Amino acid sequence: MAEQFLGVRTTFQTDQAPENRIVRRVDDELSLLEPNEGPLITLLLQLKKRSSTDTPRLEWYEDDYVARWVNISAAGAASGVTTFVLAAPGMVVAGDMLVVPGVVTSNAIPEIIRVTAVNTDGITLTVQRGFAGTTTGAIAASAPLRIIGPSYQENDPFPNSKVRRPTAILSYTQIFRTSCQFSKTQVATKTYNAPGGERQREHKKKLKEHKIAINSSFLFGKASETMDYAGTGRPLRTTMGVNSVVSTNGTAVDAGGSLTYKTFEEFSRRAFRYGKNTKLLIGAPIVKSAISFWGFSKLMLSPGETRLGVNIQKVTTAHGTWLLANDWMLENSAQGSSTGFGGMAFSLDLDQLEMRYLNANGENRNTHIIENAVRDGRDGYMDEILTEAGLIVKQPLYHTKIYNVTDFTTT
C-alpha cells in the first residue's frame, strides 16, 4: 500500500529506502577542476578516453609478433658443429635462418645458420653452418641468435606454423569515496569566501581531493582482487596504475641521480620504440626543469600552451614528440627529502589508456555527489562523493618511465 504524506511534495518522497540520497552527477565538472592537478585523469576525461563497463573486472587480450630472438644453451657450440641446443623452446622451425650477431663495433658479415630440422623437444636443432658462404665460428655460451626469416626450396612441404597465444590481462574498478559532514547550523551560517555557503565550498574542495586520489591511483596503483577481504566476506578491488605496468616491462630507465642528456636520449629511444610518435610525458618538476634548460641547445621546444585545460609544452626529439605536462603530485614526502616520487617521469601512449566506470542495471557509478547520503536522525548532513572506476593500460611496451632524477647536468 502506498504511503501517504501531509504537506508539500518534495524529493524526499522519491526514495523510500532507509537512506535518502539526492544524487548530482559531476563527472564532467571533475575534468575542469584544477586541470593541472592530476593531468592524467584530466586528459583522459577531456579526450573522451572513458567508457562504461557492466562488470568490476576489466579484461582484455594482448598479442604480439612471434619472437625474433632465441638463445643458445650454456654449452654454446664449437665452429662447424651442426647440432646444438637452445636455452629454451623457441619459435624456430625447419627452414628458419639464424644470424650469430657480433659485437657492435664489428663490421664483419656475421655467420648465417639455416635450420634443417627441429627435434620434438623444441630445443635441439639440426643446422647448416656457414650458410650462403658466410664464415663459421664458435658460438659463445648463452649467446643470442637472431631469427631473420625462412628460406625454402621450390616445392617444399608445407612449413610448420608459428602461433603466439594472446594473453589475458585484468584490471578492476576501484571504489573511491570522499565524505564530508555538516551540522545544519553550519549550513545555515553565512561565512566569508563562501558565497554559496560552506557546504558548497567544501564540496568543491573535496571534489579536487577526490580527483587527486583517482589520479594518484591511476599512476601508482596495482590491480588486485580479494573476494573475502580480511574474512569479511566482502570483496575489495584495486585498479591498475601505470607505474605497476612500466616497472615490470623492462623499459624503465634509471637516471642514476644526476640526469644527463645522454641518459635522457636513451629514455627517448625506449619511449618511442613502440606505438605512436606523439605521446604524453608526465614529469616531476625536476624533469621539466632539465628539459627546459636543454631546450636552448639540444631539444626543440614549443612555447607552453593550454590544451584541453592542461598546460602543455611540446618537446620534439629525434625519435618522437612528447606533450609535456608538469605534475606537482610527483613529489617527495617533504622538501629536501629523497623519499617519494619527485624524480620520475612517465611516457604514455594515450591511445592505449582508458578509464572505465561501472554502469549497469540502472546504477551509474561514475563520479557523483550523494547529498544527505545517510539519514540517521542527526541534526546535520552527511554527503559523499563516489566513483567506482578503473584504468586500463594496454600494450606495456608502448609506455615507459625514467626514475631516480635528483638533479641534471648542464651539458
Image (cartoon, rainbow, N blue to C red):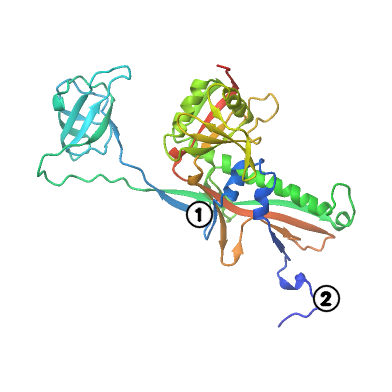
Figure quadrant of residue 216: top right
10 Å crowding of disc 1: few (<14), some (14-19), many (20+): some
Tell me if 400 is positioned left or right of 376 in this view.
left
Disc marking residue 57: 1
Q: Residue 247 at x, y = what percent? A: 49, 34
What's the amino acid at mark 1? Arg
From the viewer's perspective, is the residue at label 1 or at label 2 nearer?
2
Instruction: State whether residue 151 appears in this view.
Output: yes
Disc marking residue 227: none
Figure quadrant of residue 197: bottom right
Measured along the vertical axis of the image, is residue 385 above or below residue 292?
below
Task: Read off the residue under disc 2.
Answer: 8
Taking the spot 44% from the left edge, 32% from the top edge, the residue there is 250
10 Å crowding of disc 2: few (<14), some (14-19), many (20+): few
Q: CA distance from mark 1 to mark 2?
A: 44 Å
Task: Pick the quarter of the image with the C terminus.
Answer: top right
Measured along the vertical axis of the image, is residue 401 above or below residue 379?
above
What's the amino acid at mark 2? Val
